[in-house]
Image (cartoon, rainbow, N blue to C red):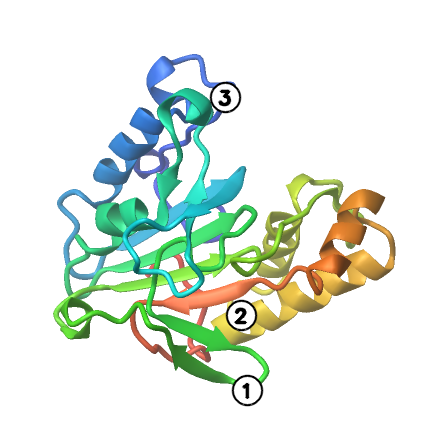
Amino acid sequence: MDTFTFPKEDIRVLTEEEPERDFVPTKKNIQNSFKWLVEDCMAGDSLVFYFSGHGIRQFDFDDDESDGFDETICPVDFVEAGTITDDEIKSAIVKPLKKGVTLNAIVDACHSGTVLDLPYVYNRKEKKWEISDRLSEDEKHTDRGLAISIAACEDRQVAADTSSCIGTSSINGGAMTSVLIQIVKKNPAITYGKLLDSIHEDLEKANKEGCLPGILKRMLNNFLSQKPQLSASKDFNVNSRFLLWQ
């Protein structure tokens, strides 16, 4: 609301602390909120999906994943109700996007790299888009909106929780969330490419300075350190501004 001027009435928050049962992040409530997010969207609309929580991998039984695993997010009742897979998320909030609509997804969870199953993945080192094997014939049509995902780590990696010691912040929660908030507050006009670079740099700095818990630091090192990932439904210009609200 402060930085991107979203109206309060257009924001829906689901947490375990919500007094109303409809706003506790159960599988059913998350699925209903997906429908709420994209319903009646039209050209010029900017949508945001933010998830901070647990993410796991499970065997891919549809044979549409090159690594053999689906990426999933975990509702609070996932033990009883099950997880929400990348296939479900894509069907719920990516496929319904109409031309001229932009969706920014920010997912701070383990194994979240391609949790929206978007076909274009940005190679930060080579500064270019790579087309994954997820590009179906249906996705080659250009009459749909643009979906962009910023994920906390690659599919094979884990994401860290931290009491942030970056700057003067004392934010508790996901490490990527902590650094993203601080970066965007300092520079609201930052580009997607620079944002991705800055998140990488700040997480590496936090890891070296011991801001991340020891056991997580060892896990991150074992997984070649946490690498946030940018993916999209189309190969857009990463030098464009990171705009959640247009």
- If you read the primary sequence from the N terminus, does the residue marked by circle 2 or circle 1 appear first? 1
- If you read the primary sequence from the N terminus, does the residue marked by circle 2 or circle 3 appear first? 3
Q: Residue at x 32, y 61 (%)?
A: 246
Q: Amino acid at mark 2?
A: Ile
**Which quadrant would residue 220 be assigned to in this image?**
bottom right
| Residue closer to the observer: 173 or 126 | 126
Q: CA distance from mark 3 to mark 1?
A: 41 Å
| Residue closer to the observer: 26 or 43 | 26
**Which quadrant would residue 205 be assigned to in this image?**
bottom right
Instruction: Sort mark 3 into few (<14), some (14-19) or many (20+) by Cα contacts within 10 Å.
Output: few
Residue 112 in view here: yes
User: Of the residues tagged 2 and 3, which is closer to the observer?
Assistant: 3
Numbered circle sitting on residue 190: 2
Instruction: Sort mark 1 into few (<14), some (14-19) or many (20+) by Cα contacts within 10 Å.
Output: few
Q: Position of residue 17 (x, y in %)?
A: 51, 18
Q: Position of residue 129 (x, y in %)?
A: 42, 81
Q: Amino acid at mark 1?
A: Glu
Find disc 1 in the rendering and name its residue. 126
Q: CA distance from mark 2 to mark 3?
A: 32 Å
Q: Position of residue 177 (x, y in %)?
A: 59, 49
Find disc 3 in the rendering and name its residue. 16
Q: Amino acid at mark 3?
A: Glu
